[in-house]
Image (spheres, helix red, strand yellow):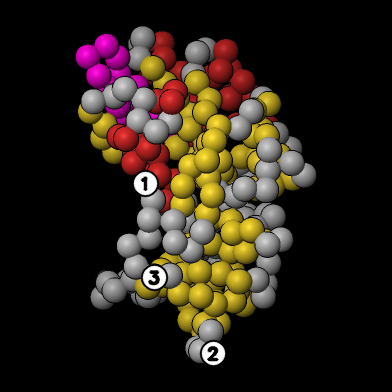
Amino acid sequence: MIFPEKLIHGTLIKRYKRFLADVRLDDGTEVVAHCTNSGSMKSCLENGAEVYLTFVNDPRRKTKFTWEMIKINGDWVGINTGNPNKLAFEAISAGTIPELAGYTNVKREVTFGDSRFDVFAENENEQCFVEVKNVSLKEGKYALFPDSVTTRGQKHLRTLMEVKSKGIRAVMLYIIQRSDVEIFATASEIDPKYADLLKKAVNAGVEVIPMQAKVTPVKIELLKKLPFEI
């Protein structure tokens, strides 16, 4: 995923009200940026750290900037939760994730039951629903999900199990927007119910694919699949 416009550099002053962040641009101007990440952002939130923003030329938006990434311990961490969906759609369409290659029809935002999944893919042999989650929480060498309790995420797991029970392929695709981790796992201390449901989902045949991404101010690209512990 290549950013279509040059990103704007600044430093984080503070994040507040979950969806807002004050940022000082390099010219000294202070702006308010939209933060798409509604979670705690634990381990990727540091006042005074370098950040990059996207300028949004939309008269309907109260905030004219979207916060894309932050530099933590010398590495860029992607915090825009919309980007993993774009990455996943591009990669599945192009067949660059080996486990999800070979689909001839790929769509975004497709409904099954009372849930809407991020990607639906099919070919002449099978159909597949894919739910995409952004991962930014780090603890040691582990990338963890979620960083706060997610009832929506729990619902997606239940519906993926239902998808699988109908004979349709069901996949949880975790996009890890940081390169300083080695293993994916669930944050069971933060959301034990989600961790338990993921175990049940895996036992029911739902596939787990944790993909690590390299984040830069120019582009975000998928690097490799990480091992996982559940």
Real-space Cα separation, disc 1 to disc 2, in angstroms: 32 Å
Residue sitting at x 23%, y 28% = 105
State whether residue 205 appears in this view. Answer: yes
Indicate which label's residue lies in the foreground, 2 or 3: 3
> Which amino acid is tagged 2?
Gly
Residue sitting at x 32%, y 35% = 94
Residue 32 at what x, y percent from top left?
A: 48, 77
Q: Is disc 3 placed on a helix, strand or loop?
A: loop
The quarter of the picture where the C terminus appears is top right
Real-space Cα separation, disc 2 to disc 3, in angstroms: 19 Å
Label 3 sits on residue: 6
Label 2 sits on residue: 28
> Which amino acid is tagged 1?
Lys
Label 1 sits on residue: 86
Compare residues 214 and 89 and report the one nearer the observer: 214
Label total for image = 3
Q: Which residues are magenta?
A: 120-131
Residue 123 at what x, y percent from top left?
A: 25, 19
Q: Is disc 1 placed on a helix, strand or loop?
A: helix
Residue sitting at x 62%, y 48% = 179
